[in-house]
Amino acid sequence: MATTPELQDRPRVLVVGGGYVGLYVALKLQKKIANAGGIVTLVDPLPYMTYQPFLPEVAGGNIEARHAVVSHRQHLKQTELIQGRVTSIDHANRTAVVAPADGGENFEIPYFDVVMAAGAITRTFPIKGLADKGIGLKTIEEAVALRNKVLERIEAASTITDPAARAKALTFVVVGGGFAGIECITEMEDLARAAVKNNPRISQEEVRFVLVEAMGRIMPEVTAKQAEWVVEHLRSRGIEVLLNTSLDNAEGSIKLINLPDKTPAQDFEADTLVWTAGVQANPMVRSTDFPLEPRGRIRTLPDLRIAGDEGIVENAWAAGDLAAVPDLTGSGLPDGTCVPNAQHALRQAKRLAKNLWASRWDKPLKDYKHKNLGAVAGFGEWKGVANINLVGSIGLKGPLAWLAHRGYHGMAMPTFERKFRVIFNWIISFFAGRDTTLLIDLDNPRGAFVAAASPAPKPAAAPAAPAGSPADAPTPGAPGTAEKTKVDPKQSVTADAK
Ligand SMILES: Cc1cc2nc3c(=O)[nH]c(=O)nc-3n(C[C@H](O)[C@H](O)[C@H](O)COP(=O)(O)OP(=O)(O)OC[C@H]3O[C@@H](n4cnc5c(N)ncnc54)[C@H](O)[C@@H]3O)c2cc1C
C-alpha cells in the first residue's frame, strides 16, 4: 500500500465524509487551517453533498436532481478533495486507508485531526427478495431512478392488456411510515396522478399506492393528533395505509404480515417496492479503533470529541448520523442522544468546527446543545404538515404547512447558488406545471450507439437450388441476378420450421 505522492505535506484535518457534517466542517475550517499552515482534506466517494430532505421532491419531479446536491469542487476551493471511500482508520497511528472511487489501488493518508462524518446507510432486515426487488431513498441516484420508474411503469401499463400484469405495473409500495416514507409516497402519488392525467389509456382508479408501517402510528416527529390527520389525509387521496403491518417476503409477490402476531395479511403483486424503514450508522466505523455504543455509533462527549470508557480520544471528532452525541435538552432518543437528522447534523458541524479550532489554541470548548425547532413535511404540491417549535408549538397542515416546508428547506439548502437554483425551479414549475417527461435508457445510455456502430450481420448465404427450379429464374432488373445463388424452397421451409 502506497502513500499517494500527490497529497499535500502539511498537518492535516481529515474529514471522512462530505455530507451535511463534512461539507460544513470543511467550509468553516478550510481557510483558517490553510492560513495556519495546515490543510483540510475531505474524502467522500461522491463529488457532492446530497441535501437528503429534497430526495422525495426529486423522486416526485419537483426538483432537478443536480440542484439537490452541492458540488465539493465548486464550494470547497481551499480543501484537498479525494474522491474515495475510507475503508479503515488506525487512529493510534493517525492513518486512514482510502479506496479510490475509480477502483485504483488503496492508499494510506496520514493526519493530525480526524472528523468522522460518514453518516448513515439504509437499515434493512433479511427479508427474502428485498435486495433484488427493493430500492431505498438515500441517494440522488435512487430518487432519479424512482421518478423514472413511476413514469415508465405508467407508460408501460397503458399498453398492457393482461389485467394482472397491468395491476402489477400500477402498484407502488413504500415500506416505512417515517418522514422519508410519507414524503416519498405522497410525492410519487402526485407525480403518478399528473402522468395518468396525460395518458388517456389509464384511469386514476387503476393506480394503487400502499404504505406499510410496522408501528401503530406514522411520523414520530409530529404529534399523535397530527399523525392521525396525516393518515386520514393519505387515505382521502386513495393511498392505502397499513399500520401494524410488516413486509414478510418480496420474492415473487409482496407478502405482508400483521404485527405483533405475524399472521398473514395481504399478498399482491407490485413492480415497485421502496424501502424507507430506517437508517443505521455507517458500518465503516467498525473498521476503526474508536469507541462505539450498542447501536454502532461512535461515542462522543457533548463537545463532539470522541470519548470512550478509557477517556477522551485526542484529535478525534464525530458528528451527525454516525455519532451518539448526548442531547443536553433532554428531548432526544430514549438513550439520551440526539435524533439523527439534518437539524442536528448542521448545527453539530458548526460547533465541531469551532471546537476543533479552539482546541488548536488551547481555548475552552463549548458543549453542543440545540432545542428541536420542529418538523416540516411536504406531501406533494400544496399539501403538507408541520410542527414548529418557535414561540410555543404551532401545528400546521395543508397549504400553509407546505409553504412552511418549502420556505424552510429553500433557505436551509446549503450555499446561495443552490438555494437560487432550487427556488427558481419551483417558480418555473409553478407557471409551467409539473414536468412528467420520462427519460429512458439511463442505465444503458450507450445502447443506441452500440447498435448503430455494430456492423449489421451479413445475410446468411442461401444453399444452391437445383438448376431449372423456379428460384433459378432471374428477377428482372435486379443487379447481378445472373450470379445469384439458387434457393431450394424445400430447404427453406425446413429451416423456418426449426
Ligand atoms: C429521504 C430523506 C429525507 C430526510 N428529510 C429530513 C428532513 O426533512 N429534516 C431533517 O432534519 N433531516 C432529514 N433527513 C435526515 C438528514 O438528511 C440526515 O440526518 C443528515 O444528512 C445527516 O448528515 P451526515 O453528515 O451525518 O450524513 P450524510 O449527509 O448522509 O453524509 C454522509 C457522507 O459520507 C459519505 N460516506 C459514506 N461512507 C463513506 C466512507 N466510507 N468514506 C468517506 N465518505 C463516506 C457519503 O457519501 C455522504 O456524502 C432526511 C433523510 C432522508 C434519507
Image (cartoon, rainbow, N blue to C red):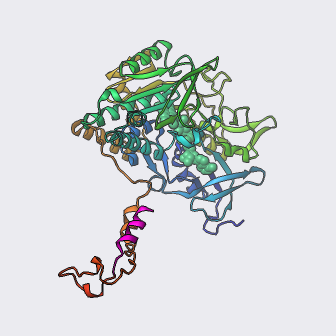
Q: Is residue 180 at all visible to an observer of this figure?
A: no
| Magenta region, residue range | 486-498
Q: Quadrant of residue 312?
A: top right
Q: Is residue 217 at all visible to an observer of this figure?
A: yes
Q: Quadrant of residue 447?
A: bottom left
Residue 470 to residue 360: above or below: below
Q: Main secondary structure of the magenta part?
A: helix
Q: Position of residue 326 (x, y in %)?
A: 66, 28
Residue that extends furthest to the left in the rendered view of this protein: 477
Left or right relative to 436: residue 308: right
Left or right relative to 291: residue 205: left
If the picture is divided into quarters, which one holds ligand 1? Answer: top right
Q: Quadrant of the C terminus?
A: bottom left
Q: Quadrant of the N terminus?
A: bottom right
Left or right relative to 493: residue 470: left
- Residue at 65%, 53% in the rendered image: 86
Q: Nearer the viewer, residue 429 or 480?
A: 480
Q: Nearer the viewer, residue 275 or 101?
A: 275
Q: Look at the image and say whether residue 489 sits in the magenta stretch.
A: yes
- Residue at 38%, 33% in the rendered image: 163
Q: Position of residue 49 (x, y in %)?
A: 49, 47
